[in-house]
Amino acid sequence: MDQDKNGMDASSGLSGDTPLGSRIGGVKVAVRPPDPILMERLSKNLRDLASKGVKVPDGSSLAVRSIDGFYYFRDLMASSRDPASGVVSIVNYDPVRRTFILSGNGEVDERCELFWFAFEAFREDHVLFHSSGDLYPDSRPELLEERISFNIGILQKWKEQNPLKEGTVFLSRGRTLHSMFTMIASEYGT
């Protein structure tokens, strides 16, 4: 291993998965466990929903604003079972380089990119939800201008209509975790 004059090996420090082409990448700045209070509340609310017969659609995503950015649960139900595997703490995002600055072991995708734009646009909202349904029905925009235009188009519709239902896509935003789970119960309850 290469070592500098201070005795540290070359592999210490930041690790990155920077994008090639249209891929979304990330630079890990730290790996720390998700907020235990948030995870406890999330688990409790999901158990309460299950006890009431509410089935959250598979593949649903959730984002919760935090002090340093937001937590992203790419697959809400899988993250509730094993928090360490699927939760990502997003510190920031560079849309030009399409690279997230993050901590955690989960993955980022186009929904996470949309959630970043949504948190920038909807400053009063602290929780975002996306149920199953492809945001990109035909083809995914690849170029920066196309991606930003596409995301702004969704945000404009979402600003006028919350929750936003368009085809198979369902998006909701709210101020509290409790209000979000109340909405999920009313939308997906039996």
Image (spheres, rainbow, N blue to C red):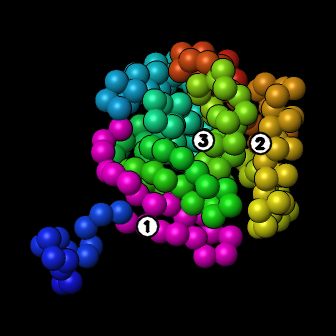
Residue indicated by mark 3: 60
Considering depth in this image, is 115 or 44 the residue closer to the camera?
115
- Label 3 is placed on what type of residue? Ser
The answer to whether residue 51 shows anywhere in this view is: no
Which residue is found at the position 66% from the left and 26% from the top? 123
**Marks 2/3: CA–CA distance:** 10 Å
The residue carrying pointer 1 sits among few (fewer than 14), some (14 to 19) or many (20 or more) residues within 10 Å by Cα, namely: some
Q: What element does badge 2 sit on? A: strand
- Label 2 is placed on what type of residue? Val
Residue indicated by mark 1: 16
Residue 190 falls left or right of residue 79: right
Q: Which mark is residue 169?
A: 2
Asked whether 25 falls inside the magenta stretch, the response is: yes
Q: What element does badge 1 sit on? A: strand
Sequence-earlier tag: 3 or 1:
1
Residue 45 falls left or right of residue 99: left
Question: Can you say whether 155 is above or below 176 in the image?
Answer: below
Q: Quadrant of the C terminus?
A: top right
Which residue is found at the position 74% from the left and 52% from the top? 134
Sequence-earlier tag: 2 or 3:
3
Residue 108 falls left or right of residue 43: right
**Marks 3/1: CA–CA distance:** 26 Å
Question: Which residues are drawn in magenta?
Answer: 15-34
Query: For residue 176, what is the image quadrant?
Result: top right
Asked whether 45 falls inside the magenta stretch, the response is: no
Which residue is found at the position 80% from the left and 37% from the top? 155
**Marks 1/2: CA–CA distance:** 31 Å
